[in-house]
């Protein structure tokens, strides 16, 4: 499977002119608590974006042990979705890899919110 490493685009007070990139079967990008992915499905059929969890479970405060699930986002034909992947669950190594069910006529971009 081909992998597209997305260029991280930083949102500033001056604004951001978004640059969408042609997708491959796998999309990879750096991740922290301020990163999100935009996937635009330009095809005539729905697609699914999937990201596998990197850890199974973890103790969370007064909640006890929480079990995590893979992320699976359905994007209807001609629509776009913003997707967030919590860093500790989906990219403890600092990178996320999201898999597309069909990358044909799909574009994507990775964005970073400013640290305030």
Image: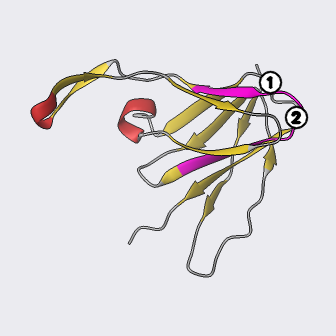
Q: Nearer the viewer, residue 37 or 8?
A: 37
| Quadrant occupied by the C terminus | bottom left
Q: Is 101 left, or right, of 98 in this rendering?
A: right
Query: Which numbered disc flags the more N-terminal residue, 2 or 1?
Result: 2
Residue for point 54% across, 35% down: 96
- Most extreme residue toward the bottom, as rendered? 14
Where is residue 103, by image quadrant?
top right
Distance from the alpha carbon under mark 2 to that under mark 1: 9 Å
Residue 60 is situated, as x and y percent measured from the top left of the image, at: 18, 33
The crowding category of the residue bearing disc 1, from other C-alpha atoms within 10 Å (few below 14, some 14 to 19, many at least 20), is some
Q: Which mark is residue 102?
A: 1
Residue that carries the numbered disc 2 in the rendered image: 43
Q: Is 1 left, or right, of 96 in this rendering?
A: right
Q: Nearer the viewer, residue 38 or 80?
A: 80
Indicate which label's residue lies in the foreground, 2 or 1: 2
Q: Is residue 91 above or below residue 55?
A: below
Q: Nearer the viewer, residue 39 or 80?
A: 80
Disc 1 is placed on an element classified as loop
Which secondary structure class fits the magenta region best?
Answer: strand
Is residue 54 in view?
A: yes
Q: Nearer the viewer, residue 46 or 112?
A: 46
Is residue 39 in view?
A: no
Residue 73 is situated, as x and y percent measured from the top left of the image, at: 60, 30
Give, as a single range, the part of the protein colored magenta: 36-50
In contact (CB < 8 Å): disc 2 and disc 1? yes
């Amino acid at each position: 499977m081909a992998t597209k490493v997305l260029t991280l685009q930083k949102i500033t007070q001056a604004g951001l002119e978004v640059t969408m990139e042609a997708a491959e079967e796998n999309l990879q990008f750096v991740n922290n608590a301020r990163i999100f992915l935009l996937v635009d499905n330009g095809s005539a059929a729905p697609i699914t974006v999937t990201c596998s969890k990197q850890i199974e479970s973890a103790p969370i405060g007064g909640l006890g042990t929480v079990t995590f699930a893979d992320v699976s986002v359905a994007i209807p034909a001609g629509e776009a979705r913003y997707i967030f992947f919590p860093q500790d669950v989906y990219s403890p190594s600092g990178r996320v890899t999201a898999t597309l069910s069909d990358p044909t006529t799909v574009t994507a971009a990775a964005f970073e919110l400013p640290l305030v």
